[in-house]
Image (spheres, helix red, strand yellow):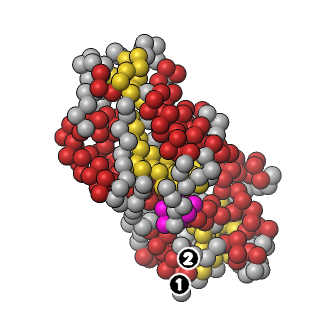
Amino acid sequence: MKFIRFSDLCAQGLVKGQRVFIRADLNVPQDDAGQITEDTRIRASIPCIQMALDAGAAVMVTSHLGRPTEGAFKPEDSLAPVAQRLGELMGREVPLKSGWVDGVAVQPGELVLLENCRVNPGEKKNDEALARRMAALCDIFVHDAFGTAHRAEASTYGIAQFAKIACAGPLLAAEMDAISKALANPKRPLVAIVAGSKVSTKLTILKALAGKVDQLIVGGGIANTFMLANGLPIGKSLAERELLDEARAVMAAMKARGAEVPVPTDVVTAKTFSADAAATVKAAAEVADDDMILDIGPQTAKKLAAQLMAAGTIVWNGPVGVFEFDAFEGGTRAIAEAIAASSAFSIAGGGDTLAAIAKYGIEKDVGYISTGGGAFLEVLEGKTLPAFEILQQRADG
């Protein structure tokens, strides 16, 4: 994937004295009082901002926050709490500027935060006039918000079209490198884990991966649907019976390539969906009518772990059982530990996946943890993200 890296521009001395506009992802969760409850995204944005300041740039940063109505700014839409937290973390004052589209006063060595970009009329529709006005504010546009890479908006796509230089910040560049390594040029065998409650929400991903991967591990409600498609009983487990043909088509596509979708041979069941439900390990063929499958069984987990240990590349999206309940975490734990121990390059993404990684403390053992939920899923679907597309176009000149 060819694109201009902001780090290269800094190293070449091309940033000094330039006006740099950084599109960051500072969309952090807040409580009812507007206090930030989790600041990972702010911390993650600092290396790019600091890089620009160290290079002697005049630095402008913007982000969206929440779901504001364009042209109707409300106090809860303000990035003021973000400006305060960013200032605390960086040990400096971070002025917040509103009404910035028509001009921003900022000198080399200074940093300003530009108010919520989604309040600007025309932002979400990627209005050309708005994008041109944003581009006129800067000499260099830096996209460093992978979480918005799947959206073609004025502050993510349009500005990149019209800015003198458009490049990828360190966060976005790392995502682009990891995705390219995992999907464009993978070391084989390539194993993908796609799990979740519904086949319908991941169907396009399953179909796209069926043409690329050597093994496609399914889990959760998705695995139940595949078990049913294989003629196995699933009791009262969550499944989508109307998608059995789609599941069979995915299995057939894999089989035609000499690849497989390993269906569980044993499962962990319960009579009710609750943390204190009694867990029973059963052969997959022996699930009773009143059973709910809440995890893969130890035999299946052992087999999948062996496949992961032998993999060259692993893509992980979704836990394989109800790992939040201790009695039904065995499968997800086994997979997490196998990924951590494997020599394969691994890339993981999705909210539940990140929660599992945190629960089992394997952050340092995963090759790359993707921060963009929707963007990560669209990459797995085989889509070219708008941010990647425009940055590649601009790199080609």
Q: Gap in Å between the C-alphas at discs 1 and 2?
A: 8 Å
Is residue 182 within the magenta segment? yes
Viewed as shown, does residue 108 lie left or right of 132?
A: right
**Which of marks 2 and 1 precedes in the sequence?**
2
**Residue 184 placement (x, y as % from top left):** 49, 66
Quadrant of the drawing holding the C terminus: bottom right
What residue is disc 2 on? Answer: 2
User: Is 241 above or below relative to 110?
Assistant: above
Q: Identity of the amino acid at label 1? A: Asp
From the viewer's side, name the closer residue of 381 and 218: 218
The disc label shown at residue 322, or none: none
User: Is 325 above or below relative to 87?
Assistant: above
Chain part drawn in magenta: 178-184
Is residue 264 within the magenta segment? no
Label pair 1/2, CB-CB below 8 angstroms: yes
Q: Identity of the amino acid at label 2? A: Lys
Magenta residues, dominant SS class: helix
Helix, strand or loop for disc 2: loop
User: Is 74 above or below relative to 388?
Assistant: above
Residue pictured at 66% horizontal, 56% vertical: 45
The disc label shown at residue 396, or none: 1
Which numbered mark, 1 or 2, is in the foreground of this view? 2
**Residue 370 placement (x, y as % from top left):** 55, 52
Q: In the rendered image, is residue 189 in sight?
A: yes
The local crowd at label 1, few if under 14, some if 14 to 19, many if 20 or more residues have their Cα within 10 Å, is: few
Residue pictured at 54% horizontal, 61% vertical: 187
